[in-house]
Image (spheres, rainbow, N blue to C red):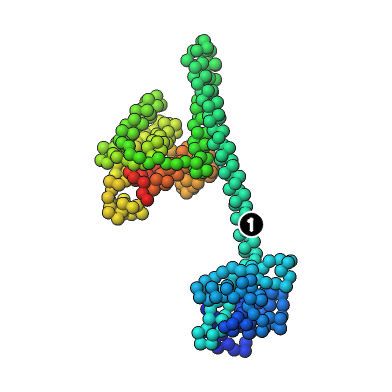
Amino acid sequence: MKLLEYFKSQKEDNNFNLLPDGIFTLEQDGKIIDVNNRILEIYNTTRFNILGRYFSDFVENGTATLNKIVNNSSSVSVKAILEDEDIHTTLLDITASRNADTGKVYVCVRNVTTEKKEQNSIAQKYAAAQTIIDEKNEFLIESSGSVLSNIVSIIGFSRALLDGIGGALSEKQQKYLNLINSNSQDLNYDLEKLFALFKLESRKIVYDNKGFDLIALIKSIDRIYKKDFTDKKILFSLDYSNLTQRDCYLDGEVVEYILRCIMDIFSRFAKLGKCSLNIGHPPVDFLKTRDFAAKDSYDENKYVLFEAKISDITFDEEELKHIFDTYYRGKNKRPIGLKATINLLKIYITDFGGEIWVYSKQNFGTMFTFVLPLKKMD
């Protein structure tokens, strides 16, 4: 607060006592020569008990505090020295300035006891909640192996029964076993993605960035999912002809997981629509409009642009607003696995220094556009 001009021409009016902050007026040696009514309220005392005494009598480490804030033009929080200090602690936020002509120092004091208590309370609650979340994630991560292995066994045994390992099945038995097998696969997928999210939340992941052939990885993933697309009659097209830089220096396993997430969205959530994945380098104009490191040289070959489109999934405006809010459900009850997969994409891509956007519109479908650097930026 700039008070110097006010005190230079102080008049016999009550403005001084109407100021919202407490004000000490001090001599150069720290002796108190004036205070306003707000100071009297903070200290629950009278002017007679304050005037003529020293600033250090009323503020912990008063002299050192005063020198610090005057010399550095800073603000500090300190403890007030009260006659009844055993009853409660009063915390003050203090700023000060010195009048070069008179040598007097004007100290502004604000009682922040309630604010500090609330901040401390919030910090303590946050720390306690974070501890619970960390312990929960640790427990779930440790439990994930046994949970998923049990589900995999259900998938395997039901598949074996459907293949006739236990003998011929009636039509009703086949129907029920198909339901068991299908639902188990969905449950396994949802839980695997949720456990992956929990692992990322706990930051129990270390990236192993080293060189690999990106085009070879794309081809291998295409081969893995080709049968799924054929069996489900999903029209899928892949184009990476514009990708000229194939050497990538990220964590190859995580990049593979990112691409699998996209293919999983296609294979699990597309019905009879069309899906496409186009991979190339982002154009210069694209880099110019976004805060990428390559924009300085406009070297599009430092990045890879992925455009993944699915025609029969759309998100409304409210869903798009919360698309990357991990646990937001909204009115449209999307499959857990779909929501988790989208959030995994966001976390992994961002961790590598990339970005992802989602565009969705009726009669168009949904486009996941994301950019990855070919090498992790410092």
As rendered, which of 359 and 245 lies closer to the eye? 245
134 sits left or right of 300 in the view: right
Percent across and percent down for residue 65 are: 57, 72
Residue 233 in view of the camera: no
Image quarter in which the N terminus is found: bottom right
Percent across and percent down for residue 357 are: 40, 46
Q: Looking at the image, how many numbered discs can be counted on the residues?
A: 1
Percent across and percent down for residue 159 are: 49, 19
Percent across and percent down for residue 206 are: 45, 41
Could you tell me which residue is drawn at 47 percent across and 41 percent down?
205
> Which residue is under mark 1?
121
Q: Residues within 10 Å of mark 1 (few under 14, many from 20)?
A: few
- Amino acid on which disc 1 is placed: Ser
Could you tell me which residue is drawn at 52 percent across and 71 percent down?
74
Rendered view: 167 above or below 139:
above
Could you tell me which residue is drawn at 39 percent across and 24 percent down?
231
Rendered view: 280 above or below 9:
above
As rendered, which of 326 and 202 lies closer to the eye? 202
Rendered view: 149 above or below 166:
below
Residue 29 in view of the camera: yes
Tag 1, which secondary structure?
helix
Rendered view: 314 above or below 34:
above
48 sits left or right of 170 in the view: right
As rendered, which of 319 and 227 lies closer to the eye? 227
172 sits left or right of 295 in the view: right
Could you tell me which residue is drawn at 51 percent across and 16 percent down?
161
- Among the 4 quarters of the image, the one containing residue 133: top right
